Image: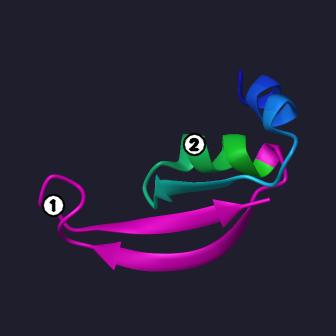
């Protein structure tokens, strides 16, 4: 499904994943996404502190 969506938009994509979501990170990296930024978030994950990764192609 990810490959299909990327093919349809025919552009570079950006996504955000939680640092602890190794499965999602591996999936995006398999489609040539690279780590762009890392930031801590305390308000956007239902108030729970977490580390967020910004990945882009």
Q: Is residue 49 left or right of residue 2?
A: left
Q: Any magenta on residue 37?
A: yes
Are discs 2 and 1 less than 8 Å apart at CB? no
Q: Look at 11% across and 60% down and name the residue there.
A: 47
Compared with residue 28, is residue 39 higher up or lower down, i.e. above or below? below
Observer-nearest of 40 and 44: 44
Q: Is residue 46 left or right of residue 15?
A: left
Q: Secondary structure at mark 2?
A: helix
Q: Which mark is residue 48?
A: 1
Q: Is residue 5 above or below residue 32?
A: above
Q: Quadrant of the C terminus?
A: bottom right
The percent position of residue 50, horizontal first and vertical second, equals 29, 66
Question: Which quadrant of the structure image shows residue 1?
Answer: top right
Task: Pick whichever, 11 or 38, lies toward us.
Answer: 11
Residue in the image at 50% along x and 77% along y? 38
Give the magenta part as a residue range: 30-57
Q: Position of residue 6 (x, y in %)?
A: 79, 36
Q: Is residue 54 above or below residue 11?
A: below
Along the line of sight, the residue nearer the viewer: 9 or 46: 9
**Gap in angstroms between the C-alphas marked 2 and 1:** 19 Å
Name the quadrant containing residue 14: bottom right
- Identify the residue under disc 2: 24
Image quadrant in which you'd find residue 56: bottom right
Category of crowding for the residue at label 2, using alpha-carbon neighbours closer than 10 angstroms: few (below 14), some (14–19), many (at least 20): some
Q: Is residue 18 left or right of residue 41?
A: right
Q: Which residue appears farthest toward the left when viewing the image?
A: 47
Q: Earlier in the sequence, mark 2 or mark 1?
A: 2
- The residue at the point 49 percent across, 54 percent down is 17
Q: Residues within 10 Å of mark 1 (few under 14, many from 20)?
A: few
Q: Relative to 52, is 54 on the left or the right?
A: right
């Amino acid at each position: 499904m990810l490959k299909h969506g990327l093919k349809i938009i025919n552009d570079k994509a950006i996504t955000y994943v939680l640092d602890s979501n190794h499965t999602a990170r591996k999936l995006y990296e398999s489609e040539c996404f690279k780590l762009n930024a890392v930031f801590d978030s305390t308000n956007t994950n239902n108030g729970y502190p977490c580390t967020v990764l910004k990945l882009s192609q």
